[in-house]
Image: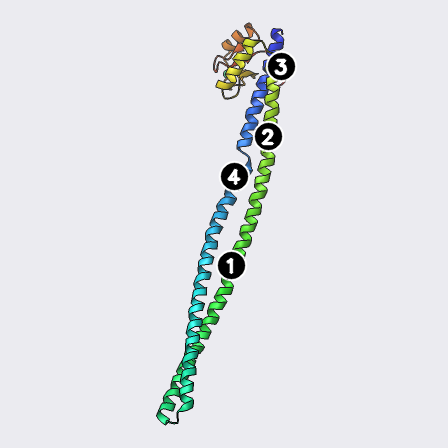
Amino acid sequence: MSEQQNAETLRALSDIDVSILRIKKQLDELPHKQQILEVRQKSKELELKALQVQQMANEVARTLVLLSDETQHSDEQIAHAQSVLDKTNEYRETSNLVAEIEMLATRKAQLEEDSLIQMEKQEKIAGVGAQVAEAARKLEAEEQAYTDAYRDAGGRLKQEIFDLQHAREALVATLPENLARDYLSAVEKKTGIGAAHLIDNRCSGCFCTLSEGQLAKLFEGPLIGICPNCNRILVTVATQEAG
Ligand SMILES: [Zn+2]
């Protein structure tokens, strides 16, 4: 391999390094991740709401049982008073029993009214409960959709990274051993970018603008130099691409 060819290989590697870094960043910043977290937060809030609705429903159910017991007790008292009334002819006892039965009947009517109010409440709570359950189902479906989208997009990006890494390996294999070693060690130490090239007098690895003196020195030397700022392999081969 000539120096020119090695320089071109490293120039191609520097592009691959940047691409891999860019795709990794995209992977980290996939919007679905944030969306999934937001949906989960909403689900948590809904779970709390569902719990509150359940507690309200339980309380109403308990109240209804109490009212029903008390109504039954009233019925028994009324029946008892009635049976006594049926057997007596005594005026005073009769009027007392009639008054008692009236009072018990009024109490029973009140209990029945209270029961109706509680039943209406129960119906409303059941409605809210159904709404909460429906919202929870929707959120669950939303989370699933975001998760699928994240997996799809993430899978594509991961595949791109995999392919680029493969291309990188193939290119590295064509480099002389010492150059390949320097490049790979730089990839490891320098945030994934092992080789750099010049874009508008800037190093593509560290984005530092090089001074005229530094540039002159680089152009005087071999095509494969070192960035005076970040120490990455710096290819000074002229490329047709505009930076
Ligand atoms: Zn640099």
Q: Earlier in the sequence, mark 2 or mark 3?
A: 2
The quarter of the image holding the C terminus is top right
Q: Which residue corresponds to the image point at 43% horizontal and 67% vertical from the top-left?
A: 63
Q: Position of residue 53 (x, y in %)?
A: 47, 58
Callout 4: few (<14), some (14-19), or many (20+) C-alpha neighbours within 10 Å? few
Residue 3, image quadrant: top right
Residue drawn at point x = 57 percent, y = 28 percent: 23
Nearer the N terminus, badge 4 or badge 2? 4
Query: Which residue is at the front of the view, 7 or 67?
Result: 67
The kind of residue tagged 4 is Gln
Q: Provide the residue designation for mark 3.
A: 239
Q: CA distance from mark 3 to mark 1?
A: 67 Å
Residue 132 picture location, percent across and down: 52, 55
Please name the residue that numbered disc 2 is placed on. 157
Mark 2: few/some/many CA within 10 Å (<14, 14-19, 20+): some
Q: Left or right: 10 with respect to 51?
A: right
Q: Badge 3, how many Cα within 10 Å: few under 14, some, many 20+?
A: few
